[in-house]
Image (tube, coloured by chain):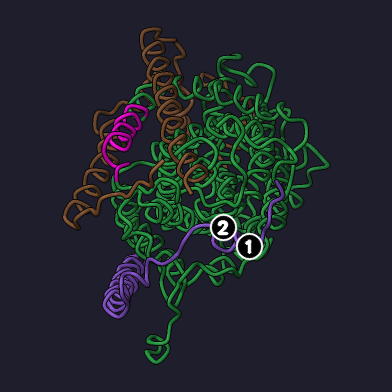
Amino acid sequence: MAKYNPPDQPIVMQLFDIACLVAAIFLALWFPLYMGWAGISKNLEKIDNPTWDALKQNPTMVAQWEKLGFTPETAHAIIQNKWVYTIDWTQLIIMTVVLLGYFIFLFMASDREYRDVIDEKFNSK
Amino acid sequence: MTTTSMGSAPQKISLSRVLGPIHVWALGVGIVLVGEFDGWNFAADKGGALAALIVLWFCGLLYSAVAMIDSEVTSTIAAAGGQYAQAKHIVGPLMAFNVALYMVFAYTMLEVSDAILFGDAIVSKSGGDSGINHNSFVAASIIILAFLNYRGVLTNLNFNFAITAIAFLSIVILFFSVMPWSQGTVLKLNELVTPENALPYGWIGVIASFHWGIWYFLGIEGTTQAAEEVRSPARALPLGTMAGMVTLLIAATMTWYVCASLLPWQLLGSTYFPLWDAGRATQSPLLENMMFITTLLAALASANGCINDAARAWFSLGRDRYLPSWFSAVHPKYRTPYRSIIFLTPIALAFAFVADLNQAITFSILSGVLQYTFMSINIMMFRKKWPLGSIQRGYTHPLHPIPAIMLFALCMVTFFAIFLGYGVQLTAMVVFYIVVSVWFHFYRYQYVRRGAQFTMPWPKPQGY
Amino acid sequence: MWVYLTYLCWAVCVGLGGWMLFDWYKIDTTYSEDTLTSSREGEIEAVSEKHKV
């Protein structure tokens, strides 16, 4: 196979490529933050006028909370804020398909490029 | 800085081979140890104190597999960029591009988390009424460490070795000063972790806590980034990585035992400073202040290693023209990838100012798990394309393919765990990788030389 | 006291950040681009490690 010679990329286009990549990075990382999508499946089970008993803390636990300066009122928001583990099947299926599709494309396209690399490296003299 | 030496620099400039096994240890453990000071404890939030211990064991297994697999491949492919260079030689260019991005993401977001932790710890120490916010401390930690990285890898990792060793020792000191052999004196494990609250959410909680269990060890695979700068990669990398893994297993076990015996699980699961709080719960000012200072040191050590690793991954992308070759410049005096270091600094700063701590950690974990999934498949392909005996390996890992299969299975569990609570983020991130993969495959790859990417003096792979 | 610490931090940022930018500029204008980007992957291995087929 003939040796592949890549074209020269003008400096402006190099800058443009970097800008695209940085924009994509920011979009991927920032957007879910901006939309508040992270860690939303928590639910505060409110108790009015909480006491250590109502929060189901034994005397040892109470002693440790108090050493760190907590009162039943301040501990309430921590103790009663509980995870809700329900599986949203539609979301799970979408995630699985996206993940699988990604890996399949990744390995297939990589293999095609890899064959070129091996061909040029070992078969062209 | 003298200008006299500048004109006479050699024509070829490369990274310099100055590191030994202790630097590899310092890089690996330094990045990871912060996980003990913050992060692993959110596993208790997701599944209870016992779940945090169960995932500690499973993740210990996962990372032992990572360390073994990594040692074999990287002792054979010793190039800056670590897993990136591995992917390039074994799977293909597009995979390599993705792997490098996983690393840049994982390390940069970890650096961001470290800087936020550093800033928050100081603000917390100053008390609520001092009226300061964490931005100045966050910025200072990032800039100072970027500066150290800029000035040379040897000094930088010597520094990292010192602060990592101190942080590790503080965990050992804390462990022995609370008399671990005598439960009931200071430690109250029986009364804090009871049959009723050990697994408050049942087994689904255990699965969910894998998300944070990863944080006990995330980043140990970064040792491979130093491949081009260690004097004897085939020996130093496996040695440093394995020693690092042993250190971390010890530190993680001690940390769990002390924290679970001192803090009620809800408190443990919600604090940003589990070890510091454990020090406070002993009511010894000495232990409290020691754990505060080492929390800061661990955060610095980690951020430092992350800057080192992310910059080398970015540098390698430039060197192969996957990104503009402008990034592949090496500083003629300090022998560091200085442009990559400078380029990544404002990105880290930007996120450090807007993200919150456990979201930044989640981004980092996501990229990490994608990378481990790749590693399990990668080692299978490596053994198939170059079977044992066809090339010289610095280290051969035992029981193949069991570690690879185990690693793959644990990655699948972790994807599901992240889905419980952060499913949309995971999907959004994978969509990002799909978009940039398409961009690379159909557009950017035209600027890449083909055969020249394969730099190892190996025979042709089998099956091609 | 804490407020002064934050000023100190900002000053350090400006100082070290400024020095890096200055050094970057100086290096880029002193050396040619070809010299700076002359690092190649695997060059040392190619000489020092031989693999038997």
Q: What residue is shown at x 65% (from left), y 16% (from top)?
A: B196
In the image, farthest residue toward the right: B181
Q: Is residue B25 visible?
A: yes
Report the amino acid beneath label 2: Ala
Q: In the image shown, does B276 or B345 lie closer to the viewer?
A: B345
Q: In the image shown, does B87 or B245 lie closer to the viewer?
A: B87
How many neighbours does mark 1 have within 10 angstroms: few (below 14), some (14-19), or many (20 or more)?
Answer: many
In the figure, is residue B450 to the left or right of B462? left
In the image, farthest residue toward the bottom: B4
Q: Chain of mark 1?
A: B
The disc label shown at residue B461, or none: none
- Which chain did the image draw in purple? C
> What x and y, as percent, mark residue B245?
69, 45
In the figure, is residue B215 to the left or right of A18? right
Q: Is residue B268 visible?
A: no
- Magenta span of residues: B430-446
- Which chain did the image draw in green? B
Do the residues indicated by labels 2 and 1 lie within the same chain of the protein? Answer: yes
Q: Earlier in the sequence, mark 2 or mark 1?
A: 1
Q: Quadrant of the N terminus of chain B?
A: bottom left
> What x and y, as percent, mark residue C14?
28, 71
Q: Quadrant of the C terminus of chain B?
A: top right
The image shows residue B200, relative to residue B458, as above or below, that is above
Find the distance from the CA under tag 2 to the CA under tag 1. 9 Å
Q: Are marks 2 and 1 in contact (CB under 8 Å)?
A: yes
| SS label for mark 2 | helix
Q: What residue is shown at x 72% (from left), y 35% (from top)?
A: B188
Name the residue carrying label 2. Answer: B226
- Which chain did the image draw in brown? A
> What x and y, as percent, mark residue B383?
66, 34
